[in-house]
Image: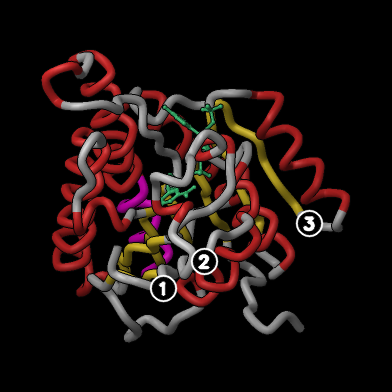
Amino acid sequence: MHEYDLTGKVAVVTGAGRGIGSAIAIGYARAGARVCCAARTASEIDATVRQIEAAGGEGLAHAVDVTDRQAVERLFEQVSRVFGGVDVLVANAGGNMATGPIEDSDPEAWQATIAVNLLGVFYCIRAAIPCLQRRGGGTIITLGSGMGHKGRSGHSAYCCAKAALWMLTRVSAQELWESGISVNELIPGPVRTRATQHQGADSVFGIQSEWVKAPEDVVPLALFLATQPAQGPTAQSFSLMRRDN
Ligand SMILES: NC(=O)c1ccc[n+]([C@@H]2O[C@H](COP(=O)([O-])OP(=O)(O)OC[C@H]3O[C@@H](n4cnc5c(N)ncnc54)[C@H](OP(=O)(O)O)[C@@H]3O)[C@@H](O)[C@H]2O)c1
């Protein structure tokens, strides 16, 4: 048996086409879960599902834009239909589309950053709740950022979105603890993905004592959070960062 056992569980991982989400989806499938891999690019989620199936697991690719509320509702209807329910949501889809000083920032990119990192997660949590309640409980994990707790100049939209996401995590946990649903934030710290490939020495990637990770390094914490008992931690933030940058 796997150290973390998800046998019989169904997980929905958004942003599972690449990077951290893909690694978590594959890690959950290896632990025995059936995993719905959701993102916009069909070829990428199909590739994640192929990796799951090659390892003997069961996956379902579902193309969705998490900023489209009705499409998110259809996602959870489809997973419930195909896999019979949902036990775990990893709200991982996100991105930092608006960089630069506030006075030069593009308002549309600012709104898009809020839309995917905050509204997209809200839509996913909202649609997941009745599914998790029908199973008598479950787990929600949001992908936060140290930037949402401490801020960073030049990243106002992303910092504000992730700060609000941390509040959404806590309020969701407060509303859901009597339903046996835990909601926790996972802060990965710097991870080499497509989203961060241009990060240079002036960012957290350049701080020598920081742990710059591969996506697979985030999987053990994601497994830990998905396998805690119903009375386990909720409304908490779990970080893989080394220092208070
Ligand atoms: N990498 C880091 O250092 C780091 C640090 C802290 C926090 N995080 C957080 O970790 C999460 C994953 O980041 P990553 O670095 O793995 O990013 P990534 O490699 O760019 O992957 C992002 C994933 O999200 C999907 N996605 C983006 N917008 C979407 C939308 N509107 N609807 C559905 N799916 C969408 C992407 O697929 P499509 O484009 O095909 O939709 C992709 O599968 C994000 O929430 C990020 O903020 C990352």
The residues bearing labels 3 and 2 have C-alpha atoms spaced at a distance of 30 Å
Q: Which residue is mark 1?
A: 242
- Amino acid at the residue labelled 1: Arg
Q: Which residue is mark 3?
A: 57
Q: Which mark is residue 211?
A: 2
Helix, strand or loop status at disc 3: loop
Answer few, some or many: residues within 10 Å of disc 3's Cα (few below 14, many 20 plus, some between 14 and 19). some
Task: Examine the rendered structure and indicate whether residue 154 appears above or below residue 40.
Answer: below
Left or right of residue 35, residue 112 in this image? left
Task: Examine the rendered structure and indicate whether residue 126 appears above or below residue 112.
Answer: below
Eye-nearest disc, 3 or 2: 2
**Which badge, 3 or 2, comes first in the chain's sequence?**
3
What residue span does the magenta drawing correspond to?
128-138
Point 41% across, 68% down: residue: 241
Left or right of residue 179, residue 22 in this image? right
Measured as percent of width and height from the top left, residue 150 is found at 19, 57
Would you say the beta carbon of the disc 1 residue lies within 8 angstroms of ligand 1? no
Helix, strand or loop status at disc 2: loop
